[in-house]
Each structure stands twice: as C-alpha cells, then as structure tokens.
Image (cartoon, rainbow, N blue to C red):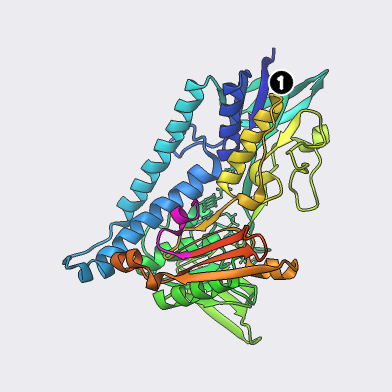
Amino acid sequence: MSEQFDVVVIGGGPGGYIAAIRAAQLGFKTACIDDWTRKDGKPAPGGTCTNVGCIPSKALLQSSENFEHAGHSFAEHGIGVTGLSMDVAKMLARKDKVVAQNNDGILFLFKKNKVSYFNGVGSFTGKDGEQWQLAVAGAKPAQIATKHVIVATGSKPRMLPGVTADNVRILDNEGALAIPAVPKKLGVVGAGVIGLEMGSVWRRLGAQVTVLEALPTFLGIVDTAIAKEAQKQFTKQGLAIHTGVKITEVKPGRSDVQVTYTDSAGKEQKDTYDHLIVSIGRVAYTGGLGADKVGLALDARGFVTVDDECRTNLPNVWAIGDVVRGPMLAHKAEEEGVAVAERIAGQHGHVDFNTVPWVIYTAPEIAWVGKTEQQLKDEGVDYRAGSFPFTANGRARAMGETAGLVKILADRKTDRILGMHVIGPMASELIAE
Ligand code: FAD
Ligand code: NAI
C-alpha cells in the first residue's frame, strides 16, 4: 500500500530540503527522500553542500585562515605567538561536528514543518492516473504515490578520463576535505572554485601546492581585471599556478601520485605529489532515479531538461538545483526550490540568474554578480567601468588587508549597474550590498 503525498522531493540538498519545507509551509502534504548517511549510519540530509561541499570547505577555510593569521598577521598588531601548532585531526573533527550540526538542524526543520523524511534512494516506478509512483530503497523500503515530484538529485564530481578517485592519493572534493595530515606536496588539477579554495586551505597549513589548469587563461569566468589581481595575490602567497597544461598520465603509487603533463610551451613535465585533488567541474547526477522508466528527458550533457520555470517534459514533475542548467550554487538551488513550491501553489516564484552572486572564499575573497567587462564587450553593450583599490581604503588599512579592488560596470546612458566585481577583504559580505 502506497503512502500518499501532494509533493515529493527526491534529493535533500539545499535545493531539495528548502523546496520541501516551502511546499509544506504552503499547506501541501510533503515528503523528502534523500540517500545520504553519515559514517556512523545516521541520516545526513543536506546533500553535497552540507556534507562534502560548502559547509565543510568553509569550516576548513576558517580554521586554516585562523592559523595563517596567528602565524603571519598577528605580529604586526603587537600580538606575540610562541609555540604555534596545527592539530589537523582536531581541525577535521571540528569540521565533522559542524556538518553533523547542520544535518541535525535540517532534520529538526523537517519535523517542525511536518515534512516526512525518507532516508534511501528514491526512484520513479510508474504512474497511476495523475499519481506518480515512487519507490524508496534503503534500510526502510517504502512505496509512495504523489501528484507532484521535484527532482533535486544534485551533482557529482567529474573525473579525468581513465582516472578513479580512491580518496587516498587521488582525491575528489570528499577526499580533499579529509586529508589526514598536511601534505608536503599537493597537486591540484583545475584552477576553478574548488581547486583554489582547497589549494588555499592546504597551502596555509604548510603544503607546497601546484595547480594545473587546462585553459590558457586563469579564472576565465571572472572579470579579467579581478582574475589578474587574483593570480598575482595567489602566486605571491605561494600557490604555483600553471595554465595551458594537458594532463597525459596520472599514476597513483603507495605513498604518492605521479602526474605527467604537457606544459603551455608543449614540453613534457613530470611531478610527484603526496595527494592529487581533481577538481575539474561537476556533472548532473541522475543515477538511481529511474528517469528512463518514465521517460524523463535529459539533455546531451546529462542534465534534466527544464524550461525557464523548472518544468520537465513530464506533467507535474519539476527539477531544480545542480541537476539542471545554470550555476551550480547552493543559493541558486534554494531559490529554484522556493520558486517551484510557490508555482505548485499557483503563485509566481521567480529566479533571475543576473542577480545570483558568486563568491570564491579564498583570501582575498572574490565575489561578483552580473556581467563581466569581457561579456559586455562581446555583447556590444555601451558601458562605463569604474574601479577603486582597497589600498586607498581606510578600513582595509586598519584591517591590514589592502590587496584587491572593487570594480563596477554600469550602462553608460542610464547608470544601471550591470556588473559588480570585488576581490578583497569581506568581498562575500560586500557583494550583497
Ligand atoms: P546536492 O547538494 O548535490 O544534493 C542532492 C542530494 O540528493 C544528495 O544528498 C544526493 O545524495 C541525493 N540524491 C541523489 N539521487 C538521489 C536519489 N535517487 N534518491 C535519493 N537521494 C538522492 N555552493 C555555494 O553556493 N557556496 C559554496 O561555498 C559552495 N562550496 C562548495 C564546495 C565544494 C567542495 C563543492 C563540491 C560544492 C560547493 N558548492 C557551493 C556548490 C553546492 O554544493 C551545490 O551547488 C549544491 O549542493 C547544489 O544543491 P542541490 O540540492 O541541487 O544538490
Ligand atoms: P570549476 O568549473 O569551478 O573549475 C574547473 C576548472 O578545471 C576550470 O578552470 C577548467 O578549465 C579546469 N579543467 C577542466 N578540465 C581540466 C583538465 N582536464 N585538466 C586541467 N584543468 C581542467 O569546477 P570545480 O572547481 O570542480 O567546482 C565545481 C562547481 O562547484 C563550481 O563550478 C561551483 O559551481 C561549485 N562550487 C562553488 C563554490 C563557491 O560557491 N564558493 C566552492 C566550490 C565549488
């Protein structure tokens, strides 16, 4: 006998759990199915972001930044530190505790909002009239019927062809967040958001970090002026960044991993690292969903196909977050979740990608929203650009963090802001303004 719901969300990441809570708040009998469990076997809702993404990475970024400040910045404030040490096991245990608190917080919110939570793999099994039939596989199998389904199954790391992440020597994001001791030499493939954040964590703790990027330009998605400043700052901090490389072989050994690549001049290079982080982007995750059973359409890259309002090709089946087109960001997934729940309720949820901010939580932080100068040029927009360096800002001087700048792009005639780009202290907070 199937349990009956109005709305069932498959996936309990920031897209899914927020969609489920909003649907329940709007009066729907709602369930959320999520398969993530902690090492101790306890359910761990919150998806990639909570378990192996935003939250644990920000915990490690904070710990490593504290260590770096104590070692390098306190002295000029007159604060003497002797016997500074780093207990990596304690730092990782703190990160795990922060994650567990967030898992439990979501379970509490489900209870408070009367969302039924199923810990297991959710899949489509068919349709009976208007009712989608779903199965939950796991410790407590269940059959569910529902009018509306929201697919929020997220993403998984992309790997180099022929390379497998063992999360001992070759690491994806999960392994990068759990290296048990500071490596002497750490390799990172991909100078994107994960590569720069995780590379910064382990560099601050003492690792010699080399970043290998395929594209000839550094941080191509960021405004060119900001990317140039970022490359200057990260190089000064000690990150060795090589652009225009082609990885030809990755050979894991018992205690290290050997990487062969062609550099930007076409010369073959070999290097050996204690660990290699592979962070070359993420792919939509639909395995286990049973998409083919009901004919749920996927695009050529494996994303669930949706229209501008997150409708799939199937009636009353919606999809949100990393599993659909658009930026792979937690707040984008959340906004889509709220918007879809409101659309199901006959309201007019709206998400505008032009106002979704990005933040890279390195030091200095990088944050932006809207168009880059190169995009405006390509689109032939008549714009004006203005920039201001933090070195001329009193607050930045008082903080001792004068690296970086703010750049604003506006329509030449109307002054409408088209893009805002910050590299510097607290960029993540400034961007909201
Ligand atoms: P996910 O968070 O991936 O959640 C999907 C959930 O569905 C998972 O629990 C998955 O196991 C589950 N699932 C999949 N299939 C099924 C099934 N068939 N049945 C049941 N459950 C299923 N974004 C930011 O905005 N800020 C950051 O600082 C940030 N930092 C990041 C750091 C790292 C290292 C990584 C990897 C990502 C980071 N992101 C960040 C991106 C962010 O994590 C994602 O954009 C976000 O998690 C997407 O949310 P989602 O709900 O779409 O999917
Ligand atoms: P990414 O797309 O940010 O960067 C991947 C980088 O790898 C790119 O520069 C790309 O050119 C390079 N690359 C691709 N193939 C390569 C190859 N074969 N060899 C060398 N380099 C190669 O992807 P990343 O860092 O894996 O992160 C995935 C996504 O997760 C991000 O795009 C972002 O959406 C999200 N994220 C967000 C964070 C935040 O908001 N602060 C933090 C971390 C992740």
Q: Residue at x 60, y 35 (%)?
A: 16
Find residue 292 and report its horizontal and vertical position in percent.
80, 37
Category of crowding for the residue at label 1, using alpha-carbon neighbours closer than 10 angstroms: few (below 14), some (14–19), many (at least 20) = many
* Amino acid found under the numbered disc labelled 1: Thr
Where does the image place residue 2, in percent across and percent down from the top left? 69, 15
Q: As displayed, is residue 150 above or below residue 56?
A: above
- Residue displayed at 75% across by 49% down: 302
Q: Within the magenta stretch, is there residue 144?
A: no
Report x, y in % for residue 319.
71, 38
Residue 88 visible in the snapshot: yes
Q: Quadrant of ligand 1?
A: top right
Residue 138 seen anywhere in this rendered image of the structure: no
Q: Nearer the viewer, residue 419 or 143?
A: 419
- Which residue is the site of mark 1? 146
Image position of 62 (left or right of 345): left
Against 60, is 258 above or below? below
Is 192 situated left or right of 376 in this image?
Answer: left
- The residue range painted magenta reads 423-433
Horizontal and vertical percent for residue 286? 70, 42
